[in-house]
Amino acid sequence: MKNTTISDDCAVDIRAVRKAYGAGESAFVALDNATVSVRENEFFTLLGPSGCGKTTLLRMIAGFDYPTSGEILLNGSDITSLPPFQRPVNTVFQNYALFPHMTVAENVAFGLEALGKPRTEVKARVAEMLRLVQLEHLAGRRTNQMSGGQQQRVALARALAPQPKVLLLDEPLSALDYKLRKEMQSELKRLQYETGITFIFVTHDQEEALTMSDRIAVMSAGRILQIGTPREIYNRPADRFVASFIGETNFLTGALHGVANGKAKITLKSGQSVVVNAASDAPASGDVTFIVRPEHASVVEGSGDLRGIVEKVVYFGTDTHLHLRLSGGEAFTVRQQNGSVSGSAVEAGQAVAVAIAEGAAQVVRA
Amino acid sequence: MTSANDLTTKLEAVDARRRWLLASPALLTIFLAAIGPLFIVLAYSFLTPGDYGDVKWQFSPDAWIGVFFERDIFDDTLSLATAHVDIFWRSVKLALITTVATLFFGFPTAYFMATRNERSRDLWQFLITIPFWTNLLIRTLAILQIIRNEGILNTALIKLGMIQEPIQILFTDTAILIGMVYVYLPLMVLPIYASLERLDFRLVEAGYDLYATRWRVLRKIILPLAKPGIIAGSILVFIPAIGAFVSPSVLGGGKNMMFSNLIELQFGQGRNWPLGSALSITVMIIVMAALLVYVRNNSAKDERHA
C-alpha cells in the first residue's frame, strides 16, 4: 500500500477552473483560469497572500464550492459537481472544526462510520490513527479540553482515517505558536511519507511552503503565477510578484540586447552590464526587470559586476546585510555569511565592487 | 487589641445590616410574588369550603382526599377519582403532542432563520415575536373563526370540492391542539434559534467532508449541538401547555377539559376552593418531579460521555 515515490500519475487535475461571484461587469473573480496537475503522492502547496484564491480552489476540490466554469478531475474521473460526501477527499480545516460533542475517538471514527464500515474495523482503524498521531492515551477525552497542537493531531487523524485519495490542508498550522508549528511541519511530512497520501496544502507562509513542499503553486489575485519545485520558485521566479513574495530580492532594471541560449546581456543605468538568465518568452529587447537574491551577491576585490557605496551595515548573527547604493542610484542589498569571528571589514561609506554568482541573475515579468 | 476587635465586630454588624436592607426589595418581591402566594394556596388546600366560595378557617383533609378519590354519595366508600386521572392524562397527552408538534414545525423554522445572513436574521426574529403583541384570547378567537364549521377552512374545502360536509374540528382535541401549537410555537422557535445561531457551520462542512449525508449531518451534528435549545424550548412549551386554560375553554368548548379548566371549575361553579388549591399543588408537584427526573437523567448521560 505504501508508495512513497511521486509518480507521474495525476491525482488531481484542475482544468481552466474559474470562480466568479456575481455576474457581468461587477462580478468578483476569485479564481481565474486555474490549471494545475497535482501528482500522486505529492506534497503540493498553494501559496499566496490572503484573498489570492488559494482557499477558494481548495474548497472546490473538497466540494464546498463549485466552479463557475472548468473541471476538476480526481484520478481521471470528473468530480466537479459531486457533493463533498461523495468525494474520496478529506480536509483538515483551519480551525480544525472538531465536533465538540464527541470524544477524540468518536471524532476520528466519524468518517469511517459514515462510510458504513463494520464496527471492528472502525475500532481498529481509530486505534491505528491515534497511534499514528501519538494520542492513544487521550482517546476518551473531549476535544475542547485539549491544547492547539493536540487538536491539530486529532484533526489530522480524523481526516486520514477514511484513507482519502487526497488530503486537503487549509492553513492548518496558522493557529499554532512558532515552536509547535515547526514541530507539526515535520510531523506533517512524516505523516505524508507514512500514509503515502497526496497532500494539498494551503498557506501564506513562504518559509513553510519552501521547507515542506515537493512543488508549489504561487497565487495572487485569483491567478496561478508559477508552479514549480521550491528551488525553481526561489531561484527562477518567473514573475516580479513571485520573486518579491518569496524571500528577499533586489530588483534592477536595464536595457536588454537579444536573448541567446537562455542568456542575455543587460546594460544598467550606470553603463555596467550584467549577464542574466532569460526565459525564451522574455522580450527580445527593451527595458526589463531582473532579480538578484542578496545571498547570491558578494563584495569583492577588483572590478566585479556592479559598483556602489555602502550605506548601512546590519549585523544579523549568522550573516550581515550590506545596504548599498549602486552607481546608477539603485538600492541593492548584499547578504554575507559571517564565516569567521573576526567580522567584516566593510564599513558604511566605503566604495565597493559587487560580484553576482554565475547564473544567479534572472529576468522576471514585471 | 480588644478595642480594635470590638470595632471590627461592630463594623461587620453594621455592614451585615446594611446588606440585608439593600437586599430587601428583591427579597420582598420574591416573597410577595412567588413564595407567599404559594403558601396561601397550600394553606387553603387544608381548609373547609365555604358555602358561597371562599373558605372556612377549619382544618379538613377532605380536599386532598378529593384530589385522588371520590366519595360514593350513598355508602360513603372511597374509590379512585377516575375523572381527575382522566383529565390529568388528557392534559399531559395534549401538552406532549403540542411539544412534539411545535418541535416539528419550530426546528426547521429556527434553522431557516439561523442560516439567513446577519441583517435579515433580526427581521425574521422580529416577525416570529409579533404574535406576542396580540392578546392571547384574541389569537385564540381568531383560530376559532378559521376552524369553525362555517369558517374559512371548511368553506374553502367545500368550495374546492374536497369535502361535502364541513369537518367538525371545533370543540375537539384537534382544535385545542391547533390553538396550543399556534400560541406556543414562538416559545419553541426562539431558544432553538438561539442555539443554532451559535452553531459553527464549519462543523457541518466537516461532516459533509467526512462522507456524512445531509440526514446524517442533521442527526449526528446539528441536532446534538442544538440540544440545549431543544430542551429549553420543550420545557418552555410543555409547562404552559399542561396548564393551558384559554385554548381548551375557547376551542374545546368546555366538554374537553384540561387540568386548568378543572381547577377553574372548583373556584367558580364548584365553590370548592380547597379542592381547587389541592389540585393546583398536585399538578405543580407532578410537573416539577417530571422535570427533575428529566434533568437528572440528562446530566447523568452527559457525564458518562465526558
Image (cartoon, coloured by chain):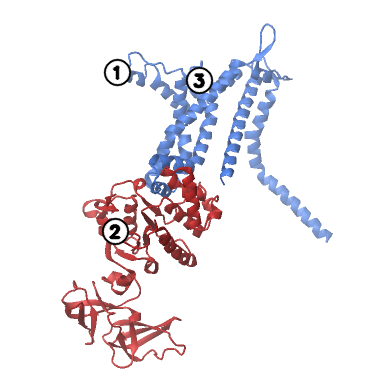
Kindly identify the amino acid type of the residue bearing the numbered disc 3: Ser
Q: Give the residue at mark 2.
A: A9
Output the letter for the chain in blue.
Answer: B
Kindly report the distance in space between the C-alpha atoms of the residues bearing marks 3 and 2: 76 Å
Instruction: Look at label 2 and name its amino acid.
Output: Asp
Residue B159, which numbered label?
A: 1
Q: Relative to residue B20, is residue A329 depicted above or below?
A: below
Residue A304: x percent and y percent?
Answer: 29, 89
Residue at x 64%, y 41% (from the top left corner) = B25
Give the farthest residue toward the top: B74
- Residue B63 sits in quarter: top right
Give x and y (percent) for residue B133: 45, 33
The answer for which chain carries disc 1 is: B
Choose between A247 and B64: the one closer to the eye: A247
Please give the name of the residue rendered at 51% of the width and 41% of the height, measured from the top-left corner: B228
Q: CA distance from mark 3 to mark 1?
A: 30 Å
- Looking at the rendering, which quadrant does residue A297 occupy? bottom left
Colour of chain A as rendered: red
Q: Which residue is mark 3?
A: B249
What chain is tagged by disc 2? Answer: A
- Residue lying at 60% horizontally and 40% vertically, measured from the top left: B300
